Image: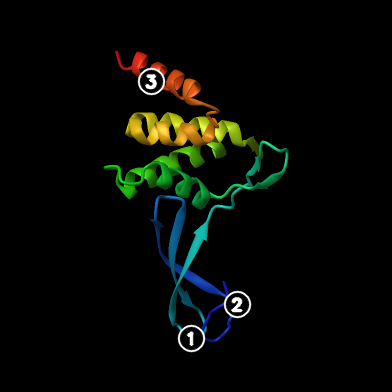
Amino acid sequence: MRCPFCGFADSKVIDSRPADDGTTIRRRRECLACQKRFTTYEVMERMPLVVIKRDGSRQSFDKVKLINGMLRACEKRPISMAEIDAAADDIEQELRGTLESEVHSDRIGEMVMDRLKNMDEVAYVRFASVYRSFKDINTFMEELTKLLGENK
């Protein structure tokens, strides 16, 4: 690792420890030339994840878009940002755990609805109404009836 102070190409590791959520390693290093210390972070390289949209187009998975969609559904509901972040992390981890490089947006939508159903039923219905594109009040009522039937 090149020293940021003198540019020397070699350093020794003094200390290593996990950082963040366990996916990053923080290393304290010392330059062998100038003896100054600096910190580096080692991050696991992730396989790119591509989302196949309903129209067949493809785009990179964006966790921020996932969180924003959940935030809209959870607006004015008693759900903390930490709960939304945890659900988004869980969904991303599950998607990356499959080792598939492409995933259909329908699958992501179903995963979001599963998480929201357990967090808050109103947020679930809000998300489902947009995601499933309810055409009329009858399809909306069918979804509500299913939800009520599961709670009995």
Outermost residue toward the front in this view: 137
Query: Which mark is in front, 2 or 3?
Result: 3
Between residue 136 and residue 60, name the one nearer to us.
136
The numbered mark, 2 or 3, whose residue comes first in the sequence reads 2
Query: Looking at the rendering, in which quadrant would you find the C terminus?
Result: top left
Query: Looking at the rendering, in which quadrant would you find the N terminus?
Result: bottom right
Q: CA distance from mark 2 to mark 1?
A: 11 Å
Taking the image as shown, residue 37 lies to the left or right of residue 81, namely right
Q: CA distance from mark 2 to mark 3?
A: 62 Å
Residue drawn at x 51%, y 60% as measured from the top left: 42
Measuring from the top left, give residue 137's x and y in whole percent: 47, 25
Taking the image as shown, residue 151 lies to the left or right of residue 135, namely left
- Residue beneath disc 2: 9
**Number of other residues with Cα within 10 Å of mark 1, as a class: few under 14, some 14 to 19, many 20 or more:** few
Q: Secondary structure at mark 2?
A: loop
- Residue beneath disc 3: 147
- Residue beneath disc 1: 34
Q: CA distance from mark 1 to mark 3?
A: 66 Å
The numbered mark, 2 or 1, whose residue comes first in the sequence reads 2
Residue drawn at x 48%, y 63% as measured from the top left: 41
The numbered mark, 1 or 3, whose residue comes first in the sequence reads 1
**Number of other residues with Cα within 10 Å of mark 3, as a class: few under 14, some 14 to 19, many 20 or more:** some
Query: Which mark is in front, 1 or 3?
Result: 3
Measuring from the top left, give residue 64's x and y in whole percent: 50, 52
Q: Secondary structure at mark 1?
A: loop
Please name the amino acid that badge 3 sits on: Leu
Q: Secondary structure at mark 3?
A: helix
